[in-house]
């Protein structure tokens, strides 16, 4: 019940295209859903996050879509650029706890020039 | 704002020695800090949660006597890998949560440990 399932494992997109990464969770007590971007040899950096009372959140080229009934959320990267090539992790955390993050397995995104 | 640093960024040591990794929140106070381990092309695995002034809470399967965590102040947590062995070689990453209960975790740049 603590798992967050992420797909696809890897994704190749042409420059200017839309990258879509999906995550699904089981525990309905999760109430915070961040996405992190990680470059090789670096720590993860927070990209964007959403709470379940909102169905969509947009920050620049990054959008989270959230479907509470389906227990799914996704990251959309519009106008993907080669500099977006990185590993993306979705995560979820519970209220009333130390706010440990449960991470998805990661998606390696490659944007071709 | 919300910068987390780690030191060292790289460490190579001989088998049997102990290695200390520092995690600092530079511009905020962190009641809670987390330590993760990441193997190549894998996700982050939570090792332990540390709260300032109290004992760390370790995840199942993580040896607390091997991975000593000290959260001595609101800006500093340390992870000591005792009697390191080659299988301890990994990428260790810390994160910190802002004091006050906000949910966002900010991650450090990571420490690459290689045990020969």
Image: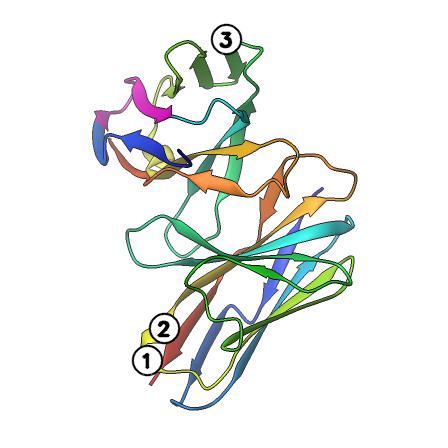
Q: Do the residues labelled 2 and 1 touch (CB within 8 Å)?
A: yes
- Name the quadrant of the N terminus of chain A: top left
Residue A81: mark: none
Q: Which residues make up the magenta segment?
A: A13-25
Chain to which the residue tagged by mark 1 belongs: B
Residue B89: mark: 2
- Name the quadrant of the C terminus of chain A: top left
In this figure, which residue is indicated by the disc labeled 3? A55
**Residue toward you, B14 or A91:** A91
Residue found at x 68% / y 60%: B24
In the image, is residue A16 part of the stretch drawn in magenta? Answer: yes
Query: Is label 2 in a helix, a strand or a loop?
Result: loop
Q: Where is residue A75 in the image (x, y as percent from the top left)?
A: 39, 22
Chain to which the residue tagged by mark 3 belongs: A
Look at the picture and state if B84 lies above or below A39.
below
Q: In which quarter of the image is residue A77?
A: top left
| Numbered circles on residues, count | 3
Q: Position of residue A91 (x, y in %)?
A: 46, 34
Query: Is label 3 in a helix, a strand or a loop?
Result: loop
Between marks 2 and 3, how big is the CA–CA gap?
41 Å
Q: Do the residues labelled 1 and 3 touch (CB within 8 Å)?
A: no
Look at the picture and state if B96 lies above or below A71.
below
In this figure, which residue is indicated by the disc labeled 1? B86
Look at the picture and state if A3 lies above or below B51.
above
Badge 3: residue crowd in 10 Å (few <14, some 14–19, many ≥20): few
Residue found at x 20% / y 30%: A12
In the image, is residue A26 part of the stretch drawn in magenta? Answer: no
């Amino acid at each position: 019940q603590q798992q967050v399932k992420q797909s696809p494992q890897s994704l190749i997109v042409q420059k200017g295209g839309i990258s879509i990464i999906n995550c699904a969770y089981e525990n309905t007590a999760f109430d915070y859903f961040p996405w992190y971007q990680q470059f090789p040899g670096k720590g993860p950096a927070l990209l964007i996050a959403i709470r379940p009372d909102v169905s969509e959140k947009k920050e620049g080229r990054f959008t989270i879509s959230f479907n509470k009934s389906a227990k799914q959320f996704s990251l959309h990267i519009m106008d993907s650029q080669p500099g977006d090539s990185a590993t993306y992790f979705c995560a979820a955390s519970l209220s009333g706890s130390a706010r440990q993050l449960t991470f998805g397995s990661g998606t390696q995104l490659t944007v071709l020039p | 704002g919300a910068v987390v640093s780690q030191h060292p960024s790289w460490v190579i040591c001989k088998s049997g020695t102990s290695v200390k990794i520092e995690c600092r929140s530079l511009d905020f106070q962190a009641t809670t800090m987390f330590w993760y381990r990441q193997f190549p092309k894998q996700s982050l695995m939570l090792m332990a949660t540390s709260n300032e002034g109290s004992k760390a809470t370790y995840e199942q399967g993580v040896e607390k006597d091997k991975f000593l965590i000290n959260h001595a102040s609101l800006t500093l947590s340390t992870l000591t890998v005792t009697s390191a062995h080659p299988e301890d070689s990994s990428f260790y990453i810390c994160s910190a949560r802002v004091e006050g209960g906000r949910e966002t975790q900010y991650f450090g740049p990571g420490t690459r440990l290689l045990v020969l």
